Amino acid sequence: MNPVPATTGGAGLCSLARRAITGWALLGGVLLLAVVLVNVWTVIGGMIGFPFAGDFELSEIGVAVAAFMFLPYCQVQGENVTADVFTSNASPRWLYIFTAIGGALAFVFGCLLIWRMYFGMLDQKAYNLTSAILQFPVWVAFIPILISIAFLILAALVTLVESVSGAKNAS
Amino acid sequence: MPVDPIALGLIGLAVLIALIVIRVPIAYAMILVGAGGTALINGPQIFLSQLKTLAYGQFSIYDLSVVPMFVLMGALATKTGLSRDLFRAANAWFGWMRGGTAMAAISACAGFGAVCGSSLATASTMGKVALPELERYKYSPALATGSVAAGGVLGILIPPSVVLIIYAVIVEANIVTMFMAAFLPGILAVILFLLTIAVYVRLFPGSGPAHGAGSRAEFIDATKGVIPVLVVFGIVIGGIYAGLYNPTPAAAIGVFVVWLFGTVRGQLSLNDIKGSILETAGTTGMIYLILLGAELLKIFMSRAGVPQAAAEWVATSGYAPMTVMVILLIALILLGCLMDSLSMILLVVPFFWPVLVEVNGGIYQGAEGAGFGMSTDELKIWFGILALIVVELGLITPPVGMNVFVISALSPNTSMAQTFKGVMPFFLAELLRVGLLLAFPVVVLWLPRILQ
Amino acid sequence: QDYTFKLHHFLSAQAPAHTQMLEPWARQVEENSGGQVKIEIFPNMTLGGRPPELVQQVRDGVVDIVWTLNGYTPGQFPRSEVFELPGVYVNDPVASNLAMRELYDSDLAEDFKGMEVMFLHVHAGQAIHMAEKEVRSPADLEGSKMRIPTRTGAWVIEALGASPVAMPVPELPQALSKGVVDGAFIPWEIIPPLKIFEQTKYQIEGANEERFGTSVFQVSMNQGKWDNLPEDVQQAFRDASDEEWLVEMGEVWRGADDFGINMAVENGNEHIVLTDEETAAFRDALAPVHDRWVEDVTGSGVDGAALIEKAIATTQEHATK
Ligand code: NA
Ligand code: NA
């Protein structure tokens, strides 16, 4: 979806960051697979007389955390949908600049989000919020989420660094 | 300070479009306008406070947990080679006819749509499989790329369908009912697309040459390739229709079955699974970020009073219900030139749906005396399918036609213009289908009625 | 108008809670204030977020007033939760509404830090809806899958030997008709909007409309917003939320409930009213729910056993039937 090549090589730090972000997304995938198994088990268990009441909550929480874990990868791969029509004839240099704008926005938003969601986590903890049946404390789910947002900030930085250096080289 | 809500909403929309034009990711454009607009009206504190839990709240909607699972199922199905088998089978059936290989591509798209929830994924998967064959049989570039790009939309029209799930979540419809409602219109699309090709190759002889049929043994062997898709579709969508399980467990079982199938056939290496997960990560992240952006934009618009003003405006305009519906659909088609289908559904349906409810006579309106001659429950279903079709049209219309982009990238020898030209007949077929469904809502409502 | 308020809630603008409770209440406040107050109601979560976020929104001042179901945030309102328990709530929403008012300052206020409660209320009580199975004793429910409303609802269902299933309300009709759940545990008032009579055959409640617990709702204002209001405006809110109003709301929710069960019966469903002995069998089976609740809230520093006793006694003092 992104006409700007996602991997421009870049500095060694950038590729290291990319690898960490990819690893984090794969970990999110493992969590998603765990949710898949819980759901498969629920159906089979329900059919053979061992219904499991918590699948609903585990799916909600598990998929939410996994989705956060996917955000940094999505950013670094340039998977966020853009409308490329008006810029399809733009020079590579301008494309890099546009990508940099997107990266800067992601960076600012990531910083806001991690700041606010940290307080969100404190709220969940202070008010003792739990899921309805399994009584799973919601604030615990915020820990991997905050780590994910830290990775999102890192991913935005990678985008920024790569596209700024790309813009310089493309002229 | 009192600001004219419509004016504020329009300014917000203009800024949104400006940001999208300079290639800001649509999700971030929505986030920026939503947050900025809310801050302008009610101060920054509102947005900052809401940000504490808003993202978690949106990401943990139970009905959405099915989305990444269906994405993963589609990715695994691609790696398992189901798309190739489907195309081979379809080509054995149709290939000997004039335009037959293009018809095979359409049919295979429909088949793949039965296990894949996304249009783009269907287009790119089938493109990889079908385009080389179409080229080999000397199909005209326009017909070849056009039919695969158009066929891609079947990925979303035939259940499962990610966009339809999102629609159901927004209007609080039952996902299962929506899946049932999409089925016949999806079949209708396949039929119309096949007819389109049949007419096209008669109008432009040589654009789709026939080729010899294979042996009987080859035919039977190729046909067997349909079995896995039939099994997966039967277990997942069949199970949902039969009420054996909810969509989320169904999708989980789908992932499991496709994985099992790929592993048994030895076509799913660890690397393939890794690739599928990363594909799922990219798509899921994209979808969820748009969800968040749309929610922020909704907050801004609600605080500005746009939806209320729009509903009031329509209610006092005196337009006939059908006129309102057609205006809304045209607005969606126009927006489709700019935005992807998911963003559009998320952006527009929260505003359009209350208007339609108003026009129909309220949320509990029964069929009798209703503006559209059907209960609001059924209107929800009907409008959902119509909206789904027209937002999917955006995938094949210029200037931003995602499917066309994907197919063009797969076929470097064909220009984007040629592909858009090749898609035009299918676009007309789609308009015809929208007209048919507008005139005969029963095509949409029949299956939900008898299966409920 | 000198004071405007945004009231946010999770149901549609056509729901009885909106038309028969929130609208009239808001208009009453406006009238009491002599035109100083304007309350804009935003239904359907139009100001963003999911229902569980409503409490947070009013605490943070994202919105000024919310109406919400306390059970959306399990664990956050341990004290007022006592009024959801079977045996504490029996069959009389008016009595529960008044009892919650009476015990508010002494026993419940702790739950509501950062918000000023306008009023608390309950619905007419959880009853049993069954798709296929006739239920007359807890044994009949054994092994059934039941859709539950809140965590106390889940405990009730478990005490009856059935398994609780959580799911969004819009999915309930489908889940019932396809056997994903065997029944649901909600008041009759849900029958009309979801046409539950189409998927169920039996509606079951105890003798003398006895129910198996209820759910507590609140209408609350942001604390800062409240504290900055002049006394006469505060009084306008207080007057609109007085005891008379609580009685009226008890009757409104009872009325919505009666409307629902009548619709089910008109559509050929069987309305099972348990005999006194059958009701007693349910009461016995539900006894462990109190212990479980006491154990749970003790962790939050609440003397659960004493609170249950007090809540029962106060509710009975206000009993209208
Ligand atoms: Na599909
Ligand atoms: Na388009």
Image (spheres, coloured by chain):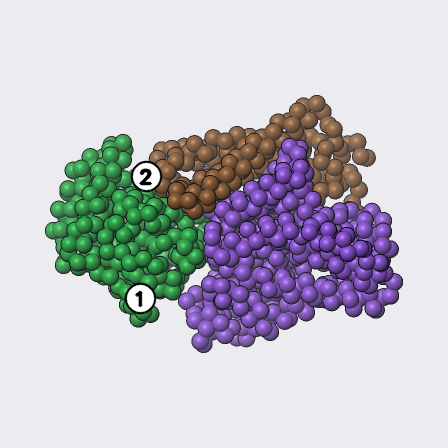
Chain colours: A brown, B purple, C green
Residue B449: image location, x then y, percent: 49, 67
Mark number displayed over residue C269: 1
Tell me: residue C211, above or below residue B276.
below
Cα distance, mark 1 to mark 2? Answer: 36 Å
Q: In the shown orientation, is residue B162 left or right of residue C84?
A: right
Which circle's residue, 1 or 2, is located before the other in the chain? Answer: 2
Tell me: residue A163, above or below residue C131.
above
Residue A56: image location, x then y, percent: 43, 44
Residue B285: image location, x then y, percent: 59, 41
Give the amino acid at mark 2: Gly
- Give the letter of the chain under mark 2: C
The nearer-to-camera label among 1 and 2 is 1
Q: Is residue C189 visible?
A: yes
Q: Which quadrant of the structure image shows residue B192?
A: bottom right
Tell me: residue C76, above or below residue B230.
above
- Give the letter of the chain under mark 1: C
